[in-house]
Image (cartoon, grey):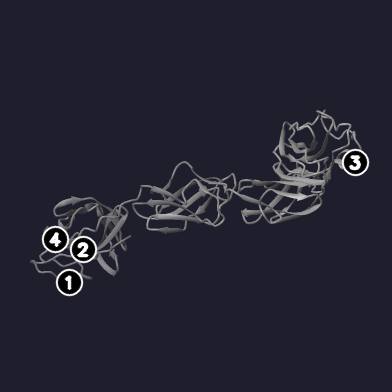
């Protein structure tokens, strides 16, 4: 930036000119420019002579001295038009401030007719009295105020500190979360621009975005939702003199996958269920987190092979008829994706046959036969004695296929001889016998004997045995004496 100061310099012609009795005034206006590190200040300098110490107006006056050839034609701002048939050597000038010599430069070494010269004083360091002395001895003086020092040249790059991210890394994915990446930049003068290099779009190749939001020296880059993943970012800044700096290596920003939650509802509740065969059952796979997405139903139902049963958008509803007896696995599945981990929920579904079963249906013939009975015990225990005085008419259970630990009712139809007969109900759980009930017949009339008990948890074929006996063996197999009967019925436990 240029500041111009106009001042008047007075030259006193100290050297007498031989043969001249009077001194006539002339004027020379020279442009003086003070330059300080790239800035120039121009001063208009008027030269004039005096006679007997009395100053006279110098404009358009001719003298016969060495300077007499110069005449000021016009002055416009800092431009002076002088006319002369002779010449002035600019190298004849010397410049002093407070009597200390100062260097100067000019745009001409000689002022020719109709030309002006521009003097530039180099790096004046102080204010005071400015003197210009010519070779002929003329002296021009003026008060001089040194211009202010030029502004420093910015050679330093911006500096950064305090990089922050909100929320902090690592973070858990949420579609509702917004993100902010923040670096504080400072510069000796002013920041021109800040840029963030990142792969927030998910690309493997980072790109640049402009950071347009800032408060004070902190520059903020704001984003909406980001997918789960590993991201990299760093920043660049330049100042108004185009000095650049970067934050260096990439910073990592990690968003971990959110946990998903999938529920399996069986007839609208989440628990293990037991259904009688051919019951139509509602299986619903539903996402809880995220709120929407694709889910699947998997099962080994009907053939024991675990397979995809159906799939679709949550909530996924499937109605299936329970036509296969067994203990089946049903699973609702949500597969892992970019933002969520996978999740499942599994329940067992037991399909049973709650149709009553008897000793006769077990063996395919009537268990109420004339002694000795046909073989209707599953082990080596004899079916009955040869006498027909007392016997078991029938054995009943209230289900054909049930689940482990189910409660079952067993009932025996008895034909006693007398009150002296003893009766028993025994239970075999595939490995051991357990007595469920014992006692004596109430008389000689037919009667029913029943008990409710809980099966153990061993899958397989379980047996219930009804015994009537005369000899009181108190054993799971009545086989002594001539009066006893053992009849069995089985039930399947899944």
Q: Secondary structure at mark 2?
A: loop
Report which quarter residue 387 is drawn in: top right
Q: Secondary structure at mark 1?
A: loop
| Mark 1 touches mark 2? (CB < 8 Å) | no
Q: Which residue is mark 4?
A: 13
Screen quadrant of the C terminus: top right
The numbered mark, 3 or 4, whose residue comes first in the sequence reads 4
Q: Position of residue 358 (x, y in %)?
A: 84, 43
Q: Which residue is mark 1?
A: 57
Q: Nearer the viewer, residue 367 or 303?
A: 367
Pointer 1 local density, CA inside 10 Å: few below 14, some 14–19, many at least 20: few
* Alpha carbon distance from label 1 to label 2: 15 Å
Say above or below: 422 vs 356.
Answer: above
The numbered mark, 4 or 1, whose residue comes first in the sequence reads 4
* Alpha carbon distance from label 4 to label 1: 15 Å
Mark 1 or mark 2: which is in front? 1
């Amino acid at each position: 930036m240029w500041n111009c100061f106009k001042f008047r310099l007075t030259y006193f012609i100290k050297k007498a000119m031989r043969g001249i009795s009077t001194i006539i005034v002339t004027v020379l206006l020279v442009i003086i420019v003070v330059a300080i590190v790239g800035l120039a200040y121009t001063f208009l300098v008027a030269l004039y002579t005096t006679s007997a110490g009395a100053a006279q107006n110098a404009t358009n006056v001719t003298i016969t001295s060495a300077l007499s050839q110069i005449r000021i034609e016009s002055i416009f701002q800092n431009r002076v038009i002088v006319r002369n048939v002779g010449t002035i050597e600019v190298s004849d000038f010397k410049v002093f401030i407070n009597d200390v010599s100062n260097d100067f430069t000019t745009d001409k070494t000689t002022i020719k007719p109709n030309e002006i010269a521009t003097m530039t004083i180099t790096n004046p360091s102080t204010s005071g009295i400015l003197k210009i002395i010519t070779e002929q001895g003329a002296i021009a003086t003026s008060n001089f105020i040194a211009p202010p020092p030029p502004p420093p040249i910015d050679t330093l790059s911006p500096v950064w500190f305090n990089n922050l991210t909100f929320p902090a890394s690592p973070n858990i994915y949420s579609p509702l979360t917004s993100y902010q990446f923040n670096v504080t930049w400072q510069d000796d003068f002013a920041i021109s621009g800040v840029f963030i290099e990142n792969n927030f779009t998910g690309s493997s190749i980072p790109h640049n975005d402009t950071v347009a939001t800032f408060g004070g020296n902190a520059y903020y880059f704001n984003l909406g939702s980001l997918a789960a993943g590993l991201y990299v970012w760093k920043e660049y800044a330049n100042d108004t003199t185009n000095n650049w700096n970067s934050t260096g290596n990439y910073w990592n920003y990690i968003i971990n996958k959110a946990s998903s939650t999938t529920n399996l509802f069986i007839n609208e509740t989440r628990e293990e269920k037991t259904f009688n065969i051919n019951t139509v059952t509602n299986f619903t796979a539903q996402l809880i987190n995220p709120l929407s997405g694709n889910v699947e139903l998997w099962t080994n139902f009907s053939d024991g092979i675990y397979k995809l049963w159906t799939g679709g958008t949550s909530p996924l509803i499937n109605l299936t008829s329970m036509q296969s007896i067994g203990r089946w696995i049903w699973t609702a599945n949500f597969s892992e994706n970019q933002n969520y981990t996978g999740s499942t929920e599994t329940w067992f579904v037991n399909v049973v046959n709650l149709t009553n079963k008897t000793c006769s249906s077990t063996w395919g013939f009537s268990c109420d036969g004339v002694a000795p009975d046909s073989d209707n015990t599953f082990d080596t225990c004899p079916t009955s004695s040869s006498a027909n005085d007392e016997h078991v008419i029938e054995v009943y259970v209230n289900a054909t296929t049930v689940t482990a630990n189910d409660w079952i009712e067993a009932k025996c139809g008895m034909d006693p001889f007398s009150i002296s007969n003893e009766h028993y109900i025994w239970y075999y759980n595939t490995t051991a016998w357990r007595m469920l009930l014992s006692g004596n017949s109430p008389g000689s009339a037919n009667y029913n004997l029943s008990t409710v008990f809980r099966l153990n948890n061993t899958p397989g074929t379980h047996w219930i045995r009804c015994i009537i006996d005369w000899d009181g063996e108190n054993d799971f197999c009545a086989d002594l004496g001539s009066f006893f009967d053992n009849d069995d019925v089985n039930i399947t436990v899944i």
